[in-house]
């Protein structure tokens, strides 16, 4: 998996969201939501930006993960948002569905 940058996607990163735990349908913590990606053409939110839990990133086959690394999770995997973000897939099904994310300041 390569690193996803907002300019590669034509998306805008918005990091002013309340941190909520992102949890799979089988109860595994993925990490804390730190932001969202917004498509300015359609005003949709295609992905969440999550500060990944190192153990979860290892299980998701992220190569050489670091604790606190940012990854994107497509919103199609989101079931519910309340006191936490509940995903509609288990950890195994999420493998291959997330990408590393890098914020570059100019």
Image: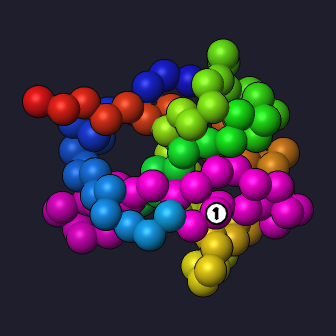
Q: Provide the secondary structure element on which disc 1 rests.
A: strand
Q: Residue furthest bottom?
A: 82
Question: Image height check: is 83 above or below 51?
Answer: below
Image: magenta residue range: 20-45
Q: Nearer the viewer, residue 92 or 18?
A: 18
Residue 59 appears in the figure: yes
Residue 22 is covered by the magenta coloring: yes
Which residue occupies the foreground of this view, 77 or 54?
54
Question: Which x, y percent locates residue 56?
Answer: 76, 40
Above or below: residue 58 compared with residue 70: above
Q: Which residue is mark 1?
A: 21
| Residue 59, quarter of picture | top right
Q: Is residue 41 left or right of residue 22?
A: left
The answer to whether 95 appears left or right of 4 in the picture is right
**Crowd band around label 1 with a 10 angstrom C-alpha radius: few (<14), some (14–19), many (20+):** many
| Main secondary-structure element of the magenta-colored stretch | strand
- Quarter of the figure with the N terminus: top right
- Residue reaching furthest top? 64
**Side of 43 where 91 appears, left or right:** right
Q: Quadrant of residue 22?
A: bottom right
Residue 42 shown in magenta: yes
Image coordinates of residue 70 in percent, x first then y, are: 50, 38
Residue 8 in view of the camera: no
Residue 84 in percent (x, y) is at 64, 73
Residue 47: image location, x then y, percent: 45, 56
Quadrant in the picture for the C terminus: top left
Query: Which residue is rendered at x = 71% and y = 34% of the image?
Result: 54
Name the residue located 53 percent from the left edge and 50 percent from the top edge.
50
């Amino acid at each position: 998996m390569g690193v996803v940058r907002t300019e590669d996607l034509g998306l805008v990163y918005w990091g002013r969201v309340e941190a909520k735990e992102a949890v799979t349908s089988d109860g595994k913590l993925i990490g804390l939501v730190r932001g969202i990606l917004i498509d300015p053409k359609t005003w949709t939110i295609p992905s969440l930006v999550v500060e990944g839990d190192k153990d979860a990133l290892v299980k998701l086959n992220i190569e050489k993960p670091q604790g606190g690394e940012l990854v994107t999770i497509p919103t199609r995997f989101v079931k519910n948002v309340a006191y936490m973000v509940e995903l509609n897939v288990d950890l195994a099904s999420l493998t291959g569905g997330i990408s590393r994310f890098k914020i570059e300041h100019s």
